[in-house]
Amino acid sequence: MTTTPSRTLETFANPRPGRDYEIRFDCPEFTCLCPRTGQPDFATIRIRYVPDALCVELKSLKLYLWSYRDSGAFHEAVVNGILDDLVAALQPRRMIVEGDFMVRGGIHTVVEARHDAPGHSP
């Protein structure tokens, strides 16, 4: 597997598809660029999901998140984009993506986006 940033998310079969269980990831070294200033934005990205048939492979997730490092995007677009890409790859029963961004201009921003598959709400 490559170590180059990539927007490709690899998956593997859920080992317990008949059971609801939650997988959590904390990614405390996330960076992207402010689309207005080009300055780096730093965040902890938290991902929680209940898988259905597929789980995300961790190295591909790491390289995927790394691919944002040189991308300019507002915090809201980053979090919703991560959720959209993960939902498209995994089709989870439930998923929450949270971006906890470091203080910028005296404002601490937390953005949370959710997905609930039809028939699988909490």
Image (spheres, grey):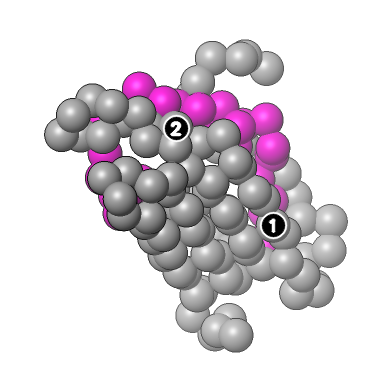
Q: Disc 1 designates what residue?
A: 24
User: Above or below — where is 3 with respect to 73?
Assistant: above
Q: Is mark 1 on a helix, strand or loop?
A: strand
Question: Given this view, does label 2 or label 1 mark the residue nearer the observer?
Answer: 2
Residue 80 visible somewhere in the drawing: no
Question: The disc labelled 1 sits on which kind of residue?
Answer: Arg
Q: Which one is in front, 47 or 117?
A: 47
Q: Which of marks 2 and 1 is nearer the N terminus?
A: 1
Residue 110 x %, y %: 41, 59
Distance, label 2 to label 1, CA atoms, is 19 Å
Residue 108 visible somewhere in the drawing: yes
Q: What element carries label 2?
A: strand
Give me the disc on residue 64.
none
Q: In this view, does 33 lie to the left or right of 2?
A: left
Question: The disc labelled 2 sits on which kind of residue?
Answer: Thr
Residue 47 x %, y %: 58, 55
Quadrant of the snapshot with the N terminus: top right
Residue 6 x %, y %: 48, 24
Name of the residue lying farthest toward the front: 106
Q: Disc 2 designates what residue?
A: 31
Crowding at mark 2 (Cα within 10 Å: few <14, some 14-19, many 20+): many
Name of the residue lying farthest toward the right: 15
Quadrant of the snapshot with the C terminus: bottom right
User: Above or below — where is 41 with respect to 67?
Assistant: below
Q: Which one is in front, 85 or 105?
A: 105
Task: Evaluate if marks 2 and 1 touch, with contact meaning CB atoms under 8 Å apart.
Answer: no
**Which region of the structure is painted magenta?**
51-79
Indicate whether residue 59 is drawn in magenta. yes
